[in-house]
Image (cartoon, helix red, strand yellow):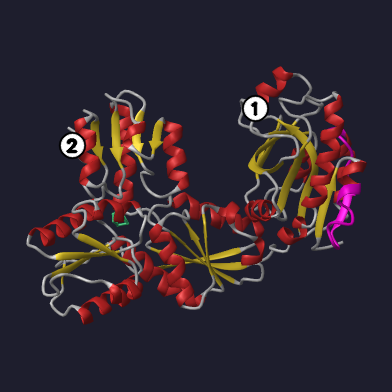
Amino acid sequence: MSGELLIVTALRSEYAALRGQVGSATVTRCGMGPARVQNWLPQLARFAPGAVAVAGVGGGLDPKVRAGDVVVASEVRDAEGRRVLRGAGPLVAELRRLGLQVHHGPVVSTDHIVTSAAEREKLAATGALAVDMESAAVVRALGSDAAPPTAVVRVIVDTAYTPIARLATLRAGAKALQVLRRVGPALPHWAGLAGPRQVLLASPRSFCAGVERAIEIVELALQRYPRPVYVRRQIVHNAHVVADLQRQGAVFVDELDEVPDGTTVVFSAHGVAPAVRLEAQRRGLNIIDATCPLVTKVHSEAKRFVGRGDTVFLVGHAGHDETEGTLGEEPGRIQLVQNPGEAEAVVVADPDHVAYVLQTTLAIDDAQDTIDVLRRRFPAIEMSPTDDICYATTNRQRAVGAIARDADVMIVLGSSNSSNSLRLVEVAERLGTPAHLVDDATGVLPEWIAGARSIAVTAGASAPPRLVDEFVATLRALGPVDVAERVVATETLTFTLPRGVVG
Ligand code: SF4
């Protein structure tokens, strides 16, 4: 066998569960436990696999891991060290699509079956999600430099709630083997990603000045004020940023009525309506405002137009935190217009006194279509003297435009509620390149990048830069990667921090 997927199992039952589910891949048995693996290793030399998956059942360590769940290893550890496995993200995505409950994290290998609650807790405290007896030895034997793409998959039998050597374990074992059968077909799909490719990085990408400022504000507030520090709405629209700040102690709420009197509340980068600010003041809350100064500028423009008697159109998307805040500046005097159709339909009392402002994160081309309709219908319409669509949105869309046509597919790192990230997908698609928005590498389905020689990568303004690095590392773990970056602008803008966290 050469260049194909090799699936390594320990038990006869695992072998039987996977054979017949994995196409032309080779399934082999290494025996149970590290000592048997050592005896088996000479056989590994006769395989020259293109990819390796160590697959079977295992024990759950983390309390959130339940019987029948799947753990895909982000790394394997044993007494001799650890090996990081970066290439498994698309396998996680594929297994989740199959409807399986999948966790991605460390797997630890021991030389014995873990039966005591005390040992399980001790191993869980290291951050490991699952335990087995073979994967670390197999992965180490593959070497580190020229190792083929490698994945470790464990379907959980025993857990902290259903320890081994009980009747329930037998039932859990049977259930785990059923799940392992379902895992089987995903393994060759994942292994099919092995091979060389080019990565085109868009630049600028990832964090903008407003997002960096907002995150720093929360971190400083956590250092400066008694815990908990509350944040109204997501500080920026990114699941990883929110989770990181939650780990640091921030408590995210939807509305002020969830914030206890006498505590600190941070307003998100998207801004708030004056009514929210007034309510927080009335309650005597310690307010820290992380509204991006470029959003504040749009609020000011809208107020200025209303103040001189204009009807103001806000071109933007309904339900977004930013548009809610801007509309709340002058309720009833600012009308939301989402698209050219709505621009054709709007009715105003005095067509000679109208103005428009824009949500900061719109797609430039889409917004222009809507603005063109407004200008045609209301020739006297006025706008801000400076662009409302912010520099970061504009630069990231231009950067996508510069590389999308040269790529087979575009991957946008960002969360599904991130307006500017969604717009990056739309820009690429408008240029004819299929594009996908994912929170991280574990959201990338194998079929999106299978056969793609060139993959364009960017990240929304709210997505941490490390997500791009991790995705590129995932691709590197699947084969040689040639990375090229195209820079369309250099960003140097920074914003000062608000009172309350400095001074
Ligand atoms: Fe501010 Fe633009 Fe970043 Fe939004 S995307 S936080 S408006 S700089």
The percent coordinates of residue 433 (x first, y second) are 52, 75
Q: Which element type, helix, strand or loop, lies under badge 2?
A: loop
Q: Observer-nearest residue: 498 or 493?
A: 498
Left or right side of 490 for 46: right
Q: Is residue 34 on the magenta stretch? A: yes
Q: Is residue 33 visible?
A: no
Q: In the picture shown, does residue 247 fall above or below 385?
A: above
Q: Which residue is mark 2?
A: 499
Mark 1, other Cα within 10 Å: few <14 / some 14–19 / many ≥20: many
Q: In the picture shown, does residue 52 fall above or below 60?
A: below
Q: Residue furthest left?
A: 308
Mark 2, other Cα within 10 Å: few <14 / some 14–19 / many ≥20: few
Name the amino acid type tagged 1: Ala
Label number found at residue 429 = none
Q: Observer-nearest residue: 457 or 77?
A: 457
Bounds of the magenta span? Answer: 16-35
Looking at the rendering, the quadrant in which ligand 1 lies is bottom left
Which image quadrant is residue 141 in?
Answer: top right
The percent coordinates of residue 196 (x first, y second) are 64, 67
Considering the image in quadrants, where does the C terminus appear? top left
Q: In the picture shown, does residue 73 fall above or below 384?
A: above
Name the amino acid type tagged 2: Arg
Residue at image point 69% right, 51% down: 99
Q: Is residue 130 visible?
A: yes
Query: Which mark lies nearer to you, 2 or 1?
Result: 2
Q: Observer-nearest residue: 106 or 43?
A: 106
Q: Which residue is mark 1?
A: 124
Q: Observer-nearest residue: 302 or 502?
A: 302
Left or right side of 209 for 384: left
Q: How many marks?
A: 2
